[in-house]
Amino acid sequence: MQQDSRASRLIALGGLVAVFAALYAPVFGDLATVWLGDANYSHGPLILPVIAYLVWTRRRQLAAEPLRPSNVGMAIILVSLAALLVGIAGVEFFLMRTSAVGVIAGSVVFIAGWGWLRRVLFPLALTALVIPIPPVLFYQAAFPLQVLATKFGVVALRLFDIPVLREGNVITLTHTTLEVTEACSGIRSLVSLFSLAVLYGYFTHTGAIKRTVVALSSIPIAILANGFRIAGTGLAAHYVSPSTATGFFHTFSGWAVFMTSFVMLMAVAGGLRAVSPLRFRQPELAS
């Protein structure tokens, strides 16, 4: 009887996987294209192995977790599939992509129960880091960052007694004009740094509060570091040559700023450990 029940669950699991693959193959294909073509989400392929690893480290806990299938999981699946249909009809990619997460969560509850979902909730939540947010929200966040970075750069340049004029997100110097575009707003480094901060905080700290502090600290760090980048670009353009605002210096400064941001992130995490010393978190003990 127990073997029949297990066989039924395996058959149900196989059927769900097959249907899931058939329904979401185009969605995942389009998502992979975004990861490879959009620098704002180039970290996507790096997050997926981490998600798989975190699930794998929970294998013993999952094996010890009793199977308590719930029909509520099927309701979650149906609602998620309805969201997929609405997304297809309205060409709303965000809705289509997030519906896949709902189907996975519902399948776990339907086949294994809420206990299993609780065990894999954090890895499942990490999918939010690789699903692009709707463009309307993305650009609403990018523009204020452009203006903020521009203001920061102007203040820094004036500290060096450099004549400068700001009009919106445009910085006018004596010999050249710098435009802080969307790519220079810092949104790209913010998205990547926040994703890194979530993982770094998780592996180096225990407790939701400290992990949250590490993750959220990436926001002011990214904004501050990008402001220094804009200021540095203006200084180079004024004292060296306007051409230094583009080309190798501009590209190199992006990498340098990101690495500096990561060092600042490590400093925040180290400060939290100094306040309350903890051993480095072992992935096998993940909860």
Image (tube, rainbow, N blue to C red):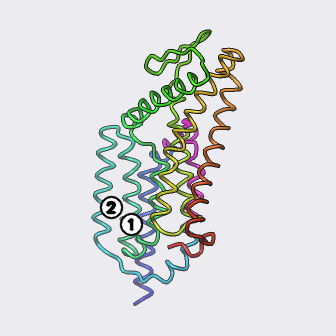
Residue occupying the far bottom of the picture: 1
Identify the secondary structure beneath mark 1: helix
Q: Which label sits on residue 77?
A: 2
**x and y percent of residue 167 in the render?**
45, 16
The answer to whether residue 164 is magenta is: no
Q: CA distance from mark 2 to mark 1?
A: 7 Å
User: Principal SS element in the magenta part?
Assistant: helix
Type of residue at label 2?
A: Ile
Identify the secondary structure beneath mark 2: helix
Q: Which label sits on residue 107?
A: 1
Q: Earlier in the sequence, mark 2 or mark 1?
A: 2
Residue situated in front as seen by the camera: 154 or 225: 154
Quick check: 47 above or below 106? above
- Which residue occupies 62% across, 9% down? 175
**x and y percent of residue 19 in the render?**
41, 58
Q: Quadrant of the N terminus?
A: bottom left
Which picture quadrant has residue 93? top left
Category of crowding for the residue at label 2, using alpha-carbon neighbours closer than 10 angstroms: few (below 14), some (14–19), many (at least 20): many
Labels 2 and 1 touching (C-beta < 8 A): yes
- Which residue occupies 38% across, 33% down? 140
Residue situated in front as seen by the camera: 45 or 143: 143
The answer to whether residue 49 is magenta is: yes
Quick check: 198 above or below 144? below
Which span of residues is magenta-colored? 30-54
